[in-house]
Image (tube, helix red, strand yellow):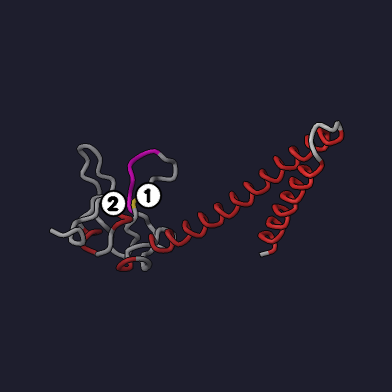
Amino acid sequence: MTKADAKPSWPSEFTKIEHAQGYSYGAYGGLNGRPYVAGKCCETVLPRDSFGHSHQCTRKNGFGPAGLFCKAHDPIARKAKDEAERAKREAEWEAEKLRNKMDALAFDIAEMCVKVFAQQQPFEKLEQMTAAYKDLRDKVEKDGAS
């Protein structure tokens, strides 16, 4: 038996009507569960009050692989949405990292100003740090504009 022929163990993996027809919703321990109801989404959901056993989603199917899912549980659309959200979060994290780096560099520049004023450090070092800060600021402004 190849991997493609193997029966999925969870409704979100169903790709054929036979998979849904062979699944028992709410089966737990000694309970047999309920069979698949044609015309309804094949995803397993929990009751709204979160007590009791899982059951088949009551929404109309017609989306996803073999039209077995409702619009909310369509695994293809769900995956695309997750990928878009992940990309957005990663962009936000990168921007946050840049802002944190700028804050740390601004603090270092302030310390360096004190040392230059007290003649403990050469002025050139302060110029190098401010140039690095300006480069970071330009990068943040460029990323924010795009």
- In this picture, residue 138 sits left or right of residue 23: right
Above or below residue 40? Residue 101 is above
Residue type, numbered disc 1: Val
Quarter occupied by residue 122: top right
- In this picture, residue 99 sits left or right of residue 112: left
Above or below residue 73? Residue 124 is above
On residue 45, the disc is 1
- Please provide percent x and percent y for residue 11: 30, 54
Residue under the image location 84 percent in, 33 percent down: 119
What segment carries the magenta color?
51-56
Nearer-the-camera pick, 38 or 63:
63
On residue 120, the disc is none
Nearer-the-camera pick, 67 or 81:
81
Instruction: Look at the numbered disc 1 and give the secondary structure of its residue.
Output: strand
Our reading of the magenta stretch's main secondary structure is: loop
Residue type, numbered disc 2: Trp
In the rendered image, the residue lying farthest to the left is 1
The quadrant of the picture occupied by the N terminus is: bottom left
- Please provide percent x and percent y for residue 118: 86, 31
Q: Which residue is mark 2?
A: 10
- Please provide percent x and percent y for residue 113: 82, 38
- The verdict on residue 9 being magenta is no
- Please provide percent x and percent y for residue 46: 38, 46
How many marks can you see? 2
